[in-house]
Image: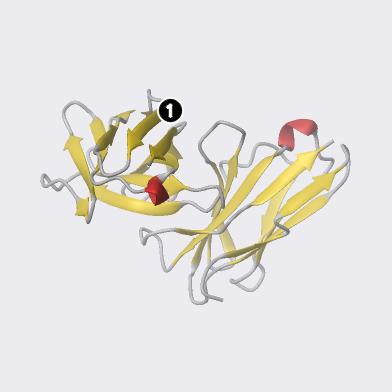
Amino acid sequence: AQTVTQSQPEMSVQEAETVTLSCTYDTSESNYYLFWYKQPPSRQMILVIRQEAYKQQNATENRFSVNFQKAAKSFSLKISDSQLGDTAMYFCAFMKQEADKLIFGTGTRLQVFP
Amino acid sequence: GAGVSQTPSNKVTEKGKYVELRCDPISGHTALYWYRQSLGQGPEFLIYFQGTGAADDSGLPNDRFFAVRPEGSVSTLKIQRTERGDSAVYLCASSLMRDSPLHFGNGTRLTVT
């Protein structure tokens, strides 16, 4: 069975600074996807970034980038130039290729301070 | 609508009662998912529909939980004989097809007293 671990329950960062959220996972699969989702108080899960395991290049989306270490089964999220609107819960998630369920970690609460 | 719509936003019910939670997916999305998020946890998969059929219901916790999607669009999650442990946020998501990005709704917060 796959598991996703987020070891940082809470993080804080000052506006305009950079913060990194950690995620590790366990799987015996070779082909899979990894995701970071943001959940603001509205409860809606918003996709931040997606990484295909077969791609060596780390995914980037504007201020968001990942450090994907397949051998170490690590998938951290770096947020650059943090903004107040980045304040939210962040969830790391795993999905087997050709599967239909996301497996989520327990989340990291990020607070961005002015 | 522009996004996935879930109603009601909040539902309070008494232990033992029956509840229905509704999900309106994005128009044209064939795949629909239900997840349950307990306090302080990440969402947990309940069921996946492809069109009208439940392609994977392995996440439903027991036979008190049931979901339908009769016309391949709107879905209803039904919970019989609710228990206090059913209290959670129930999230619905849809995608254009399997493996496409998921679009989530704002969830229904269910409180069983």
Q: How are the colours assigned in the image?
A: secondary structure
Question: Percent from the top left, x then y, of residue A30?
Answer: 22, 38
The quadrant in which residue A22 appears is top left
**Residue furthest top in the image:** A7
Relative to residue B106, is residue A78 depicted above or below?
A: above
The quadrant in which residue B112 appears is top right
Q: Which of the chains bears the disc numbered 1? A: A
Q: Quadrant of the N terminus of chain B?
A: bottom right
**Residue furthest left in the image:** A56
Element under disc 1:
strand
Q: Amino acid at mark 1?
A: Glu
The quadrant in which residue B100 appears is bottom left
Relative to residue A62, is residue A33 depicted above or below?
A: above
Which residue is under mark 1? Answer: A10
Q: Residue at x 14, y 48 (%)?
A: A55
Q: Residue at x 39, y 47 (%)?
A: A84
Asked whether, in this view, residue B16 is left or right of residue A7, the answer is right
Question: Percent from the top left, x then y, of residue B26?
Answer: 52, 71
